Image (spheres, rainbow, N blue to C red):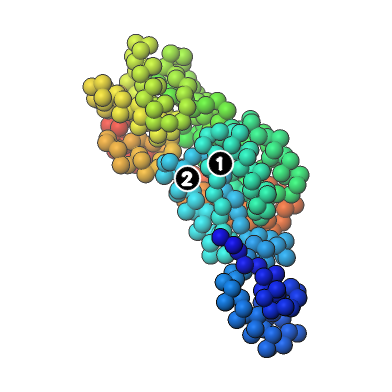
Amino acid sequence: MKHITIKDIANYLSISVSTVSRALIDDKNIRRETKEKVLEAATLLGYRPNPVAANLKYGRTNTIGVIIPEGITPFALQIISGIQSVLYPKGIKVIIAESSEDAGKELENLRMMERFMVDGILINLCSYKANKEEYLRLRKAEMPMVFYDRIPHGLDVSQVIVDDYKKTFFLIERLIRSGRRQIAHIQGPDDIYNSVERFRGYKDALAKFNLPFREELVVQTGMTFNDGVRAADLLLSRQVEFDTIFAFTDVLAIGAMNRLRELGKKIPEEVGIASFSGTELSTIVYPQLTTVEQPLFEMGRTAALLILERINDFTSPCRSVVLDAAIKMRASTDSKEC
């Protein structure tokens, strides 16, 4: 499809491109008759103004890039809803790219956003180790960036997070106080800093109650439902006793829970299941899932507000916002929600 430009209008009317441009923006120095001819020609030829090109005159494109690690679960959708609640009323459009938990693809997405000349980038990264040099390069190029949920630990960046360590610690503590003493852990990849912090919270909660940390009760895996299934199979194959599984995410927890039920295990009577994320998935499965529920809409909204701050004043200090998260005790651990 050919896009009609102001040059096409100028050729059609045999006038200069600058005259067409000024007529289209209602320049008071252009005669009324000329403006009318230009507008008529624009309608006839099917001209549509390019808002990005127009905004570039003022140093902005009125677009924000959002990079997500996956778009399958409700997690990203709730975050994006929060982002859009702030940006859309201001006439700022969102360009979304998915990295599919691949740091190489994330790098491509970062460079694509830069080529598209977005005003800023919001990113939930794949690995806190892989693309640090690229984040530093973009910062040096004065690209406003805000990280949410998963962050490049060790870099001074604007970020929106929850306290993964504390919330995991408190969740495990409550499970132990309810009588669950043999808690297995399905751990996420160790290049996701949230996984590192949740694992630390799990270990420290065990230590508080003088419960031994047992490596055979920990399975490190990927991020999919099938990874949760395989983790459950691996735990069973080790023939170690466990009365509860705490999983890095709802997705992993549900994969493990479904597999255990397939094998005849009763949830929560024989094995309790708990997780971290708190997406809608936790309430649409049976039994409903005990989880740490993150304020995803608020996380997106806060990230959008921070990126606007960075765009308006790139020299302002980076800010870290820590949001509260709620521990939801549900039927998967034989607990009442609170």
Residue 168 percent location from the top left of the image: 46, 32
Residue 132 percent location from the top left of the image: 68, 35
Rate crowding at label 1 as few (under 14), some (14 to 19) or many (20 or more) other CA atoms within 10 Å.
many
Please state if 20 lies on the left or on the right of 39 as rendered.
Answer: right
Visible residue check, residue 158: no
Element under disc 1: loop
Instruction: Provide the residue designation for mark 1.
Output: 124
> Mark 2 and mark 1 in contact (Cβ < 8 Å)?
yes
Residue 119 vs residue 295, the one in the foreground: 119
Residue 77 vs residue 303, the one in the foreground: 77
Quarter of the image with the C terminus in it = top left
Element under disc 2: helix
Q: Residue at x 68, y 89 (%)?
A: 33
The image quarter containing residue 193 is top right
Q: Residue at x 39, y 22 (%)?
A: 230
Q: Residue at x 46, y 30 (%)?
A: 223
The image quarter containing residue 260 is top left
Q: Amino acid at mark 1?
A: Asn
Q: Which mark is residue 76?
A: 2
User: Extreme top residue here?
Assistant: 239
Quarter of the image with the N terminus in it = bottom right
Disc nearer the start of the sequence (1/2): 2
